[in-house]
């Protein structure tokens, strides 16, 4: 008997494939859109994490527990940044409890909720869900720059799509010239459950409406965002002359 076909990609394959695509995407954003390397590094990170999002409905695996921990930290940081823009700014203690609540919900609650409401490789492994995560990234990434929000949203969807694509690739046995029963269960538009399908499309419709409400009027502005402020700089004697402030001794 020949070797059995792999039914789906494993954790290491998914994170490696998503990281590779995320790095390529960040490089392309830098070359073609002038996106700063620091923004690009975050886009590559979001793509890598996006490659694991379809498996949030999985109730097993130490790796997924670590992933939800990282995701919880990122969401907590985004909540802190978002609350800093409130007028008047909330007290530090309110910031603290909001951040803790966000982390606990993502780390312990969201995965259990998704796992109870869905079945593995159900609607969570679908193209509409890919759009939902991209819409969430666009709406809640903590920046006012339109192009940067698009870059981050596409990064998340790139990682998510890489997961679906790898699952479909691993469902094909090239040596045996056949496909197994897992083929077609990842890159799909609907699930067996009509309620799960309708719910996901309803959520996608709502998020699309939200995006339309905040989408800037007029043609798309592709001006790259200004370079981020980095609180680390080289000593003056190591900086090139053109980068020194006016009047500084060379």
Image (tube, rainbow, N blue to C red):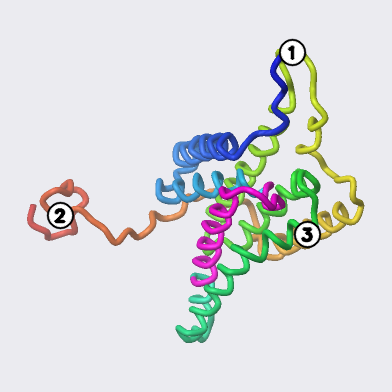
Is residue 185 or residue 147 the one in the foreground? Answer: 185
Q: Position of residue 16 (x, y in %)?
A: 53, 36
68 over 127 or under it: above or below: below
Q: Position of residue 29 (x, y in %)?
A: 50, 41
Quarter that holds the N terminus = top right
Q: Residue at x 66, y 52 (%)?
A: 134
* Dot 1: element: loop
Q: Quick check: is 69 in the magenta stretch? A: yes
Q: Which is in the foreground here, disc 1 or disc 2?
A: 1
Q: Are marks 3 and 2 in contact (CB under 8 Å)?
A: no
Q: Is residue 143 visible?
A: no
CA distance for labels 1 and 2: 66 Å
Instruction: Tell which circle, 1 or 2, labels the residue nearer the N-terminal end.
Output: 1
Q: Residue at x 46, y 54 (%)?
A: 225
Q: Which is in the foreground here, disc 3 or disc 1?
A: 1
* Residue receiving disc 2: 235
Which residues fall within the magenta stretch? 54-80
* Dot 3: element: helix
Q: Position of residue 19 (x, y in %)?
A: 52, 39
> What is the residue that sits farthest to the left in this orientation?
249
Q: Quadrant of residue 8?
A: top right
* Residue receiving disc 1: 1
Q: Which is in the foreground here, disc 3 or disc 2?
A: 3
* Residue receiving disc 3: 116
CA distance for labels 3 and 2: 55 Å
Is residue 159 or residue 53 the one in the foreground? Answer: 53
């Amino acid at each position: 008997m020949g070797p059995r076909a792999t039914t789906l990609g494993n954790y290491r394959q998914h994170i490696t494939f998503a990281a590779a695509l995320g790095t390529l995407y960040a490089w392309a954003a830098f070359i073609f859109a002038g996106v700063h390397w620091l923004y690009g590094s975050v886009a590559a990170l979001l793509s890598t994490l996006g490659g694991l999002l379809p498996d949030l409905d999985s109730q097993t695996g130490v790796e997924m527990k670590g992933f939800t921990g990282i995701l919880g930290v990122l969401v907590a940081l985004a909540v802190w940044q978002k609350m800093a823009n409130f007028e008047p700014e909330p007290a530090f203690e309110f910031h603290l409890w909001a951040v803790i609540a966000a982390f606990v919900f993502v780390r312990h609650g969201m995965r259990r909720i998704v796992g109870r409401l869905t079945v593995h490789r159900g609607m969570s492994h679908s193209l509409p869900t890919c759009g939902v995560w991209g819409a969430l990234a666009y709406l809640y990434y903590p920046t006012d720059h339109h192009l940067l929000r698009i870059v981050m949203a596409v990064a998340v969807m790139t990682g998510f799509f890489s997961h679906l694509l790898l699952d479909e690739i691993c469902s094909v046995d090239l040596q045996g010239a056949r496909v197994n029963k897992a083929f077609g269960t990842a890159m799909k538009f609907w699930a067996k459950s009509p309620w799960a399908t309708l719910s996901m499309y309803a959520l996608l419709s709502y998020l699309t409406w939200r995006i339309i409400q905040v989408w800037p009027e007029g043609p798309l502005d592709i001006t790259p965002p200004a370079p981020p402020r980095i609180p680390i700089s080289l000593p003056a004697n190591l900086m090139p002359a053109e980068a020194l402030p006016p009047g500084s001794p060379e």
